[in-house]
Amino acid sequence: MKIKVNNKEFDIEIFGNKAIINENLEKKIEIKDDTLIIDNKEFFIDYYEEKEEESLLIINGMAVVVSKKTIDEQIIKEIKSPMNGHVNEILVKVNSTIEKGQGLVVLEAMKMFNEIKSPIKGEIKNILVQKNQAVKSGETMIILK
Amino acid sequence: MQKVLIANRGEIVIRIANTCKKLGFIPCGIYSDADKNALHIKYCEETQDIGGSYPNENYLNMDRIIDAAKKMDCDFIHPGYGFLAEKSEFAKQCTDGGFIFIGPSFKVLELSGNKVLAKQVASTIAPVAEGKEVSRLDESIELADKIGYPVILKATKGGGGRGLRVLNTVNDLKKSFNISKKEATSSFGSDKVYIEKYIENPRHIEVQILGDKSSSNIIHLGERECSIQRRNQKLIEETPSSALTDETRDLLTKMAVSIMKEIKYDNAGTVEFLYKDGKFYFMEINSRIQVEHAITEEVTGIDIVEQQLDIASGKGLLLEQDKIKAKGHAIECRINAENPFTFTPCPGTVKQFLAPKNNKNIRIDSSLYSGYAIPPFYDSLLAKIISNGKNRKESIENMRQALLSFRISGIPSTIPFHVSALNDDRFLHGVYDTSFINNMKYYSDKDSEIAAAIFVHLPKRIQYVQNKDEINLWLLSKYNSFFNPEGTFYYNNIMRWAN
């Protein structure tokens, strides 16, 4: 999808731990504490603030403003698993309305339970996973309306 | 061994304590309740808890400070900058209490702290912007008409860029006059205000002075260019100024020395000028050590705090003007806990703090450490990066490297502003004035932009979000009195946090 970063346009698609930039550049991504590693290059996330319209990051000492609209419209409509694990519980039903921050799915990974919360207010359009099913990192679990 | 109470907080205490130790003085310190975890405590050999959180309960509270100095049996009191540094009453109380105040005498402070009087004295030596003190609105309107808009309305006893207003029309003046008087009273303890011609987008250049009353020796250590400011407060300073030629520098430094001779200045101080269309206008005298003193130290090799101690202790000012030679170029970037775009102060806990090591080209004056929770009651200055080089180009390159390897996480800081300024053509060519930040282009490289775009799409990013509600909850949990202040306090000395 196309998004604006410091008023420049980028086309970015993310699949699990891979990102495709401008349709041809494939990059491996990894995140460790405050460091985002892209193809072995380190980016320090010093600060991250989300506002209605945009997000502000301080990354490697530089301020970067990412327009948020496209994120809300596209990516956030798909709730993806942030990790490899098992679906322990599904907390919502199809067609139910949800609030921002409401828990959607509980994932179990490395004996830890992680509640995946909704980043937006909306409605559940489809649930693609079942209880006790294994999910991979980046796999779409829920689609929002 | 003699003891010096450093009546301040943060980086300047550490800075002064280091010179005290070098010269064989024992540095003593004070701290407030909110500063119990402050780094400056560790650099002092003795400290006293003077309580409270708001500045008027501690760092502005003369009685408590004098009391602490007595308890620790100090000989000297160094006020640092800000807080009580330029309050003549404090200098008097120190002297009356039997301490040596490291700074000008009570009488000099009374004169330099009164903008109208200082301007009167300076006007016999240097050009000044036309204007005078006013007490009534009708009188102000008449004066503003005479000198022509835009005019500036300032508190007579004000300072530090606070409490001043630029007025473009008579309606602006009518609206602001009473508010300014009220603000002047609450912030500076006097409702006196004055009006003068507003010089639009000048350069702001100041001269570092050292004076010794006992020998009538007054010298200068060259100029500092301080035009890059937000809300009339400095962000970047450099020396020498690219705006000056040898002739104009000579004229400027001579005027500064003459003004300080005229008022018989004692100890370290600065004369500030505005520079526009080849003409200097005297602005004010800052009768204290300044935040940006370090760039002068880097190019002259002179430890200004050492000179302050020598002058105050009676050893005297032994430097001679002819022997002072500035070499190379130095820049200072002030790292504040502020949003890099809006400059709104933002509180929080510093997750990780990593600074480049001090070397011959980089000096870091800072009071930060990983895990430090920045209290919301004081100034937002966290650290100063001072770079130097053989020439301006080298100094800029050294600063750029230092900024990019400087890491503060968990809170926003002005680092991105500095990175952008150091990539701005106006700065690179040395052609800029006080309007610099109005036309900033923020700098970022493509890799970081891609990294940011990827990051905001990662589900895991949620755990990094910092929003205002969380910040406010954090503030409330740590400082529950913050949103319900009791009693009076000097609002201008408190960080203006988000909201």
Image (cartoon, rainbow, N blue to C red):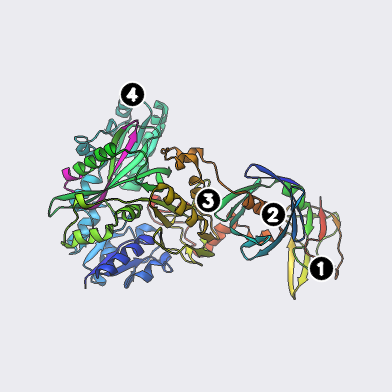
The residue identified by callout 3 is B416
Q: Which residues are magenta?
A: B260-278
Residue B383 coordinates in the image, percent (x, y): 43, 58
Determine which residue is flagged by label 2.
B454
Label 1: chain letter: A
Q: Is residue B268 magenta?
A: yes
Single out the mark in the foreground, 2 or 4.
Answer: 2
* Relative image position of residue B86 (x, y in whole percent): 27, 52
Residue at mark 1: A89
Q: Residue furthest bottom?
A: A111
Q: Cα distance, mark 3 to mark 2? A: 20 Å
Image-quadrant location for residue A34: bottom right
Q: Position of residue B326 (x, y in %)?
A: 29, 50
Under mark 1, the amino acid is Glu
Along the line of sight, which residue is nearer the eye, A117 or B456? B456
**Which of marks 3 and 4 precedes in the sequence?**
4
Residue B145's disc number: 4
Q: Secondary structure at mark 1?
A: strand
